[in-house]
Image: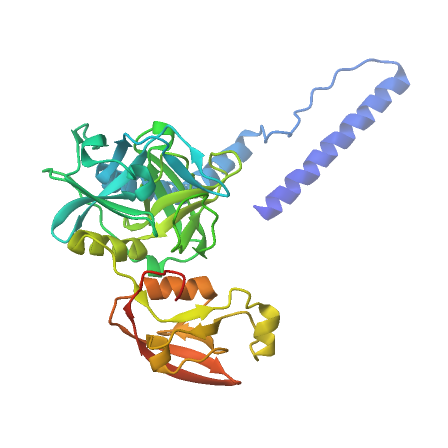
Amino acid sequence: MIRKNIVWNFIGFAVALTVVVCQARAQETGRVRTITVAVDRYGPVDQQIRAELQQQLADTVKILQAQANATRLIAKLIGPAVVHIEAEVLGRRALQHGAARPVEEAGSGIIVKLAGKTCVFTNRHVVAGASPDNVRISLADGRIIQPSKIWSDPETDVAVMEVSVEDVVAAPLGNSDEVEIGDFVLAFGSPFGLSHSVTFGIISGKGRRDLDLGDSNVRLQDFLQTDAAINPGNSGGPLVNLNGEVIGINTAIASSSGGNEGVGFAIPINTFLFTAKQLVEKGAVTRAFLGVTLDARFDYQAAQQAGLQQLVGTRVVTVTPDSPAAKAGLRPGDIILRMDGKLIENDAHLITLVNMSEVGKEVTLQVLRDGHILDVKAVLVARPQSPTQG
């Protein structure tokens, strides 16, 4: 086809040249002639060429149809498990990076099975302050139910509602640790009250931890970022991979207008589950504690001075006496590079990892000290009331 395209481009040039010559000769002889030439501005008019293009289109469309078939199947599989949530709460606010704006829309949720119970996962800010009697859950089949219990955690914006209902579909859960930037995802929810809407996009970022979410108390952040359209009302709805598995719970947007601008955020399902399981099984969340204060100003220049070629890890400022860190032998000035093999990106990353670990777990910390790398082991304990330390 490349050779044919070259030939047809040359023919087009020859036709144009012929028109100019004929017009010039007509002017020379004083005769007025009308010459009709098909202009290939919007596509060829030659039937043979159009037939060839039609065949190319049919071959290409097969690829797009396969993708469309996949997204249709995912929508059919996940759709029955998606719910629309309305809670009678004054002053509900959508989480938005840079500001939190009051909205009239409610939110979304996803039905799952957890600890032998039928539950609805959603965001705390969707139902915060509402009693079970003031929450209406609209199922995909039109039934309206109310939760029997509501648990929530302000530090992660996680909320779980227990429901008593028969014949419902529970969504399968994936592994958010396997999610990579560029993965295709679908976002389900009720944007602007339009229930059971589906949008399509990719994972456009990971590990977003320093979002300004207005006056919310969402301190433990490790968001997935997506360009799938997320708007007010999508909060609490699932973010789903191409296997039809929930890999995140849609939570916030970055916007100057209050609507979708191509940057949305979701809580990774592994992070969500860690909190949700404790809420359902124990009624509260117990966070782990290491016992270090970290240097938020540790930058590239400081990393270079310590002998690192790139900005990774976090530097210890103080060690709490009689803490797991103290018992492990950590010292001020130590740079923690890894925890259980996972590279530490910054201070917020380590704080999140510690807080999302089981109490009593033994962790291995890779530490840079005076130009030498060493491994130390620490057994995490329950976090004291002050949450500002790792």
Residue 19 image offset from top left, x and y in percent: 77, 26
Q: Is residue 112 visible?
A: yes
Q: Is residue 355 above or below residue 66?
A: below
Judge from the rendering whether residue 158 lies leftward or rightward of residue 46; answer left or right.
left
Split into 4 quadrants, where in the image is the C terminus?
Answer: bottom left
**Quarter where residue 360 is shown:** bottom left
Q: Front-most of 285 and 44?
A: 285
Q: Is residue 343 visible?
A: no
Judge from the rendering whether residue 188 lies leftward or rightward of residue 203; answer left or right.
left
Q: Say which residue appears at 38% left-offset and 50% top-offset.
A: 218
Residue 309 image offset from top left, x and y in percent: 57, 75
Q: Front-most of 35 and 302?
A: 302
**Quarter where residue 6 is shown:** top right
Residue 69 image offset from top left, x and y in percent: 32, 41
Q: Say which residue appears at 60% left-offset and 29% top-offset.
A: 42
Q: Front-most of 284 and 308?
A: 284
Q: Say which residue appears at 32% left-offset and 60% top-offset.
A: 385
Q: Say which residue appears at 28% left-offset and 29% top-offset.
A: 88
Residue 287 image offset from top left, x and y in percent: 29, 62
